[in-house]
Image: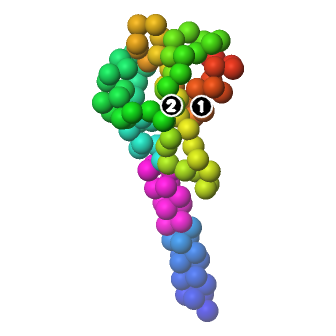
Amino acid sequence: MTKKLVLAVCTAALFTVLTGCTTYDRAASYVNEPVVSDVKVGMTKQQVRAIAGPPSTSASLIHAQGTCDTYAVAPRDGKAQTYFVSFNDTGHVMNKGYQSCSEYDTQPK
């Protein structure tokens, strides 16, 4: 009886670990979007476009300075996810994150 209990506990623990790995892999693939993982502050707009391709939208910022590109990245929990890259007046990445350019422009950080 004790061997069966130990085997059941070990099986449950293994299943839990494997389930955690599956969840992590999904998160890792989400973060591995080129615009998310490879674009760095200070890069030029040309470097960003070479890495991420053309943006979904591009706009001039009103409350923040410069311009902003919005990219569509892998859906999360079934919802479309956006990622913005803002550029200063010299065309270098100033900021980036998980929201649209219009959302960023309302409360630039």
Q: Is residue 2 left or right of residue 17?
A: right
Which residue corresponds to the image point at 68% horizontal and 19% vertical from the top-left?
Answer: 107
Q: Position of residue 78 (x, y in %)?
A: 61, 56
* Position of the N terminus by quadrant: bottom right
Judge by depth and name the residue closer to the eye, 26 or 35: 35
Q: State which region is magenta.
A: 18-29
Q: CA distance from mark 1 to mark 2?
A: 9 Å
Under circle 2, the secondary element is strand
Which residue corresponds to the image point at 66% horizontal and 27% vertical from the top-left?
Answer: 103
Q: Amino acid at mark 1?
A: Ser
Q: Position of residue 95 (x, y in %)?
A: 51, 20
Judge by depth and name the residue closer to the eye, 85 or 23: 85
- The answer to whether residue 95 is visible is no
Count of numbered tags: 2
Instruction: Please report contact status of discs 1 and 2: CB closer than 8 Å, yes or no.
Output: yes
Dot 1 or dot 2, earlier in sequence? 2
Under circle 1, the secondary element is loop
Q: Which residue is mark 2?
A: 57
Q: Which residue is mark 1?
A: 100
> According to the image, what is the colour scheme of the structure?
rainbow
**Above or below: residue 13 compared with residue 44:** below
